[in-house]
Image (cartoon, helix red, strand yellow):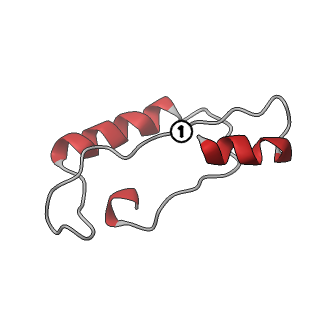
């Protein structure tokens, strides 16, 4: 949230931000785990939820579970 506050002056007043935390992840491998079956289902649900959102930019980490 601190990042959102810091960047706020860079965006129009009518900007909408969607902040999403990753879905459930597996425990192995510990350095870059994939999503669990539940996490995959949750991510698929998010796809449907944001399907009509006018996204201009997406920021994500470069991990297996975010690809």
- Tell me where residue 46 appears, x and y as whole percent: 42, 36
Report how many numbered discs are placed on residues in the image: 1
| Element type where label 1 sits in the image | loop
Q: Please report the residue visible at 25 percent of the width from the left and 44 percent of the height from the top.
A: 24
Quadrant of the rendering where the N terminus is positioned: top right
Q: Is residue 32 left or right of residue 3?
A: left
The residue at the point 86 percent across, 37 percent down is 12
27 vs 5, left or right, is left
Mark 1 Cα-neighbour bin, 10 Å: few <14, some 14–19, many ≥20: few
Front in this rendered view, residue 51 or 16: 16
Can you name the residue that lies furthest to the left here? 28
Using residue 54 as the reference point, say whether residue 64 is left or right of it.
Answer: left
Q: Position of residue 48 (x, y in %)?
A: 45, 33
Q: Is residue 51 above or below residue 40?
A: above
Question: Which residue is identified by label 1?
Answer: 19
- Picture quadrant where residue 64 is located: bottom left
**In the rendering, at what x and y percent does residue 62 appear?**
45, 68
Quadrant where the C terminus lies? bottom left
Q: Nearer the viewer, residue 49 or 19?
A: 19
């Amino acid at each position: 949230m601190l990042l959102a506050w810091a960047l706020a002056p860079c965006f129009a007043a009518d900007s909408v931000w969607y902040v999403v935390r990753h879905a459930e992840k597996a425990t192995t491998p510990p350095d870059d785990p994939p999503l669990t079956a539940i996490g995959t289902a949750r991510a698929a649900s998010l796809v449907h939820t944001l399907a009509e959102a006018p996204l201009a930019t997406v920021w994500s980490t470069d991990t297996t579970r975010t690809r």
